[in-house]
Image (spheres, rainbow, N blue to C red):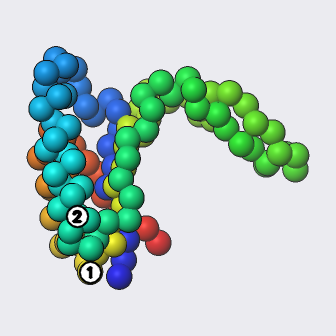
């Protein structure tokens, strides 16, 4: 069965009061529990919001080097993702829609090749 990555950029979340986020947590957890119960769960998690704590590994020069911070400076960065193992795109759309509703922000979906 194909796997799909359902993800969002942190900037898509928007500004909301803390109470709003507290309401969303249980909704998102319920969807992940539903994905697990359906046998489609591979992984789900949010990434640390402080992208300044990121580091990069680069071997393009022929020597492996590690540097602090993101490799490419960008206005958008990955906020979290879910990987599902499903029968088809229709099933991936179903889970992406449920995640989008529970979280309250858009999700992008790509098949893992």
Q: Which mark is residue 87?
A: 1
Label 2 sits on residue: 35
Dividing the picture into quarters, in which one does residue 20 lie?
top left
Q: Residue at x 43, y 38 (%)?
A: 47
- Can you say whether 14 is above or below 56 in the image? above
Q: Residue at x 43, y 68 (%)?
A: 112
- Can you say whether 19 is above or below 79 in the image? above
Q: Residue at x 25, y 48 (%)?
A: 107
How dense is the environment of label 1, judged by Cα within 10 Å: few (below 14), some, or many (20 and up)? Answer: few
Q: Which mark is residue 70?
A: none
- The residue closer to the viewer here, 41 or 50, is 41
- Can you say whether 97 is above or below 101 in the image? below
Residue 88, image x, y percentages: 25, 78
State which mark lies toward you, 2 or 1: 2
- Tell whether 5 sits left or right of 105: right
For marks 2 and 1 on the same chain, the one whose residue lies earlier in the sequence: 2
In which quadrant will I find the N terminus? bottom left
- Tell whether 51 sits left or right of 41: right
Residue 16, image x, y percentages: 18, 21
Q: Is residue 38 visible?
A: yes
Dividing the picture into quarters, in which one does residue 97 lie?
bottom left
């Amino acid at each position: 069965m194909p796997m799909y990555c359902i993800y969002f950029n942190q900037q898509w979340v928007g500004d909301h009061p803390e109470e709003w986020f507290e309401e969303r947590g249980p909704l998102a957890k319920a969807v992940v529990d539903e994905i697990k119960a359906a046998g489609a769960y591979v992984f789900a998690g949010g990434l640390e919001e402080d992208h300044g704590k990121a580091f990069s590994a680069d071997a393009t020069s022929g020597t492996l080097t590690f540097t602090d911070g993101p490799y490419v400076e960008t206005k958008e960065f990955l906020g979290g993702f879910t990987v599902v193992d499903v029968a088809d795109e229709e099933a991936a759309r179903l889970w992406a829609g449920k995640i989008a509703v529970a979280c309250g922000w858009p999700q992008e979906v790509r098949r893992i090749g």
